[in-house]
């Protein structure tokens, strides 16, 4: 449906005696009304008529027609009069009856006539008897004047119509009478001294004009728009849901790791923190991130759930080795408290006081064969390597010169070390108290050779057995192990201390993971029975280190532990021998023989 819109410019010159000024707002008023009707009705057939001969164009076959008359109007002998402009530019006065004849309404069924002139209602009597259904809306009564608005550059009547029509944008049909009433109400809202009275008249039947909302094209457009909006809403909802899920999952997955550095790295060069992701099942560790510490006192990083080992790396000023590692296992959670893990490094004085040792922080860990959750509340330092022959020899020399003489419960290797130390010192048999008893014991247990030293013509102990290498673990008795640690103001590790130092916090079976690997430890026994036991240097298998950085925990020589049960001596980190589990990190082995030549010592220093 197409609506005809005709704007008729009544711009002829009015009589001079009226003293009327020429109007200037024809085109702005036309554009205003046209834009309004275009928005309401969609496609309209708009024409602008400013010459008399164009009035013939008012004839239309459209079902609906809107005619807007604008110009000067006056009463000539009581009859409504206007002035139109001829094609040659001259003006001609047209009375109301003639104007009605010019507006040949006969072929149009429904007409809305908008009269925007002074004395507009005076035209009403000339419109009686038209053949079309006609609703005329007048800008003023028969005895009133109307006016332009110089600021808005349009007429007062057109602004009132604009406001009224805007209120009907969402209606399916436009009722001209409703427009008249709304325009009249809007006109009275303005606080203007001269406010013309908008009115209307009806000829024939009342009618309503369908708007674009009621058109098939609009319905198709609306349907299409609705589908698009629905798709956009669905898409937006999906995007919002996916984005929300993404961030929720991201929050669920990520956890914060904080390291309190303080002055811990004051005596270090090139200090940095490295983060390693552990694959326990496949015995693998991959470095994923590294950051320099410099002058920072707090380091933060975000990581995904998993097993990690955080390592403090760098060079100490005294060139000694210290291991400060922190193994941690995290799981995805929404609990903000569980998502934050903090590691407070020891201060520099404590670090400097523990050369050759690893720091084991207070942690929650998986203990034993059944992986029971346990808490290690007290941090401690533990030797990275067990004591080797070279480090243990000064202790032996000290024992040899002790007033009570050598310990009769020493293992054979200790005795051999005593013999070597005595030979190096030139100590004679007669100068040592209790030596006869020691010699009798050695003769009975191992039948060592006794020789005479030709240089001093005195009896001395000569090394007649193979002594392990200087960097091999020192084989000691439990009493010697306790005495050795006491001499350092330290203690033997308890079962739990040794186990957490060996396996970390994730419950692994071996220090390096869950799979046994002969290239990571020196283990003798099953499945290769009958292997000869030959002690290896304590630093031979660096790849077998535990998450805390402790080495030589499995095989080679076992480690004495402080037997918490109290009724038997025990050690950990042994060989296969009779059971493969003997070489796991949770295996505790009893000692039934006073002399076990494959047990050494490493000490712990508990932090208050």
Image: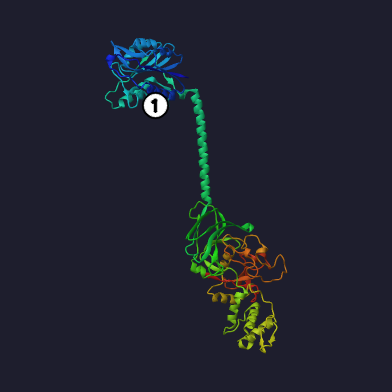
Residue at the front extreme, as displayed: 88
Q: Position of residue 302 (x, y in %)?
A: 52, 54
Task: State which quadrant residue 58 falls in.
Answer: top left
Q: Using the rendered view, name the quadrant where residue 461 is placed.
A: bottom right
Q: Is residue 162 visible?
A: yes
Give the left or right position of residue 158, taking residue 312 as reference.
Answer: left
Residue 607 appears in the picture as rendered? no
Secondary structure of the residue carrying tag 1 is helix
- Residue 570 placed where, x, y %? 61, 71
Is 298 situated left or right of 13 in this image?
A: right
Compared across the picture, whether 196 is left or right of 557 comes to left
* Colour mapping: rainbow
In-front residue for pair 542/53 = 53
Residue 308 pos. (x, y %): 56, 58
Please count the marks in the image. Answer: 1
Density class for disc 1 (Cα within 10 Å; few <14, some 14-19, many ≥20) is some
User: Measured along the vertical axis of the image, is residue 138 above or below residue 258?
Assistant: above
Pointer 1 residue: 166
Residue at position x 42%, y 15% from top?
110
Q: Position of residue 274 (x, y in %)?
A: 55, 59
Is 515 situated left or right of 275 in this image? right
Q: Is residue 24 above or below residue 395?
A: above
Task: Give the farthest residue toward the bottom.
Answer: 457
**Residue sitting nearer the eye, 536 or 595:** 536
User: Residue visible at 54% across and 75% down?
Assistant: 488
């Amino acid at each position: 449906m197409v609506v005809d819109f005709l704007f008729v410019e009544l711009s002829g010159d009015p009589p001079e005696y009226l003293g009327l000024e020429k109007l200037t707002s024809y085109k702005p008023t036309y554009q205003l009304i046209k834009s309004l009707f275009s928005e309401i009705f969609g496609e309209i057939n708009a024409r602008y008529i400013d010459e008399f001969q164009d009035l013939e164009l008012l004839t239309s076959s459209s079902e609906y027609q809107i005619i807007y008359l604008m110009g000067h109007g006056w009463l000539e002998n009581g009859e409504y009069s206007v002035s139109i402009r001829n094609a040659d530019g001259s003006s001609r006065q047209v009375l109301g009856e003639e104007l009605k004849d010019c507006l040949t309404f006969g072929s149009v069924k429904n007409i809305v006539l908008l009269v925007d002139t002074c004395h507009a209602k005076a035209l009403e009597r000339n419109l009686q008897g038209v053949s079309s259904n006609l609703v005329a809306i007048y800008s003023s009564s028969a005895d009133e004047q109307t006016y332009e608005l110089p600021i808005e550059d349009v007429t007062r009547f057109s602004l009132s119509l604009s406001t009224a029509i805007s209120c009907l944008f969402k209606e399916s049909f436009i009722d001209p009478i409703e427009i008249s009433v709304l325009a009249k109400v809007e006109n009275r809202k303005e606080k203007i001294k001269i406010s013309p009275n908008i009115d209307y008249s009806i000829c024939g039947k009342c009618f309503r004009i369908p708007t674009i909302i009621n058109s098939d094209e609009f319905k198709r457009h609306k349907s299409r728009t609705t589908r698009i909006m629905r798709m956009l809403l669905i898409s937006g909802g999906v995007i919002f849901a996916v984005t929300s899920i993404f961030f929720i999952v991201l929050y669920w997955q990520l956890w914060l790791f904080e390291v309190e550095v303080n002055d811990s790295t004051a005596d270090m060069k090139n200090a940095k923190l490295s983060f390693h992701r552990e694959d326990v099942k496949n015995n693998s560790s991959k470095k994923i991130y590294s950051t320099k510490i410099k002058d920072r006192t707090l380091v933060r990083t975000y990581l995904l759930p998993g097993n990690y080992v955080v390592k403090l790396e760098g060079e100490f000023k005294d060139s000694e080795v210290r291991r400060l590692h922190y193994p941690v296992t995290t799981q995805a959670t929404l609990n903000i408290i569980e998502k934050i893990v903090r590691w407070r490094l020891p201060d520099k004085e404590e670090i400097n006081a523990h050369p050759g040792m690893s720091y084991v922080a207070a942690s929650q860990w998986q203990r034993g064969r059944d992986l029971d959750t346990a808490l290690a509340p007290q941090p401690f330092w533990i030797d990275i390597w067990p004591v080797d022959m070279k480090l243990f020899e000064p202790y032996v020399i000290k024992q040899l010169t002790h007033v009570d003489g050598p310990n009769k419960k020493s293992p054979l290797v200790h005795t051999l070390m005593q013999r070597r130390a005595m030979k190096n010192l030139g100590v004679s048999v007669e100068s040592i108290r209790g030596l006869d008893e020691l010699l009798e014991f050695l003769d009975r247990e191992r039948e060592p050779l006794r020789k005479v030293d030709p240089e001093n013509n005195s009896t001395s102990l000569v090394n007649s057995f193979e002594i392990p290498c200087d960097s091999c673990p020192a084989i000691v008795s439990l009493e010697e192990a306790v005495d050795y640690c006491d001499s350092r103001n330290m203690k033997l590790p308890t079962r739990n201390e040794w186990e957490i130092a060996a396996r970390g916090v994730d419950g692994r079976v071996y220090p390096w993971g869950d799979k046994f690997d002969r290239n990571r430890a020196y283990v003798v026994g099953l499945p290769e029975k009958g292997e000869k036991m030959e002690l290896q240097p304590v630093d031979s298998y660096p790849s077998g280190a535990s998450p805390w950085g402790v080495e030589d925990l499995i095989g080679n020589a076992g480690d004495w532990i402080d037997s918490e049960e109290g009724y038997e001596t025990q050690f950990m980190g042994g060989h296969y021998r009779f059971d493969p589990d003997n070489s796991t990190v949770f295996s505790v082995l009893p000692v039934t023989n006073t002399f076990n030549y494959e047990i050494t010592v490493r000490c712990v220093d508990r932090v208050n």
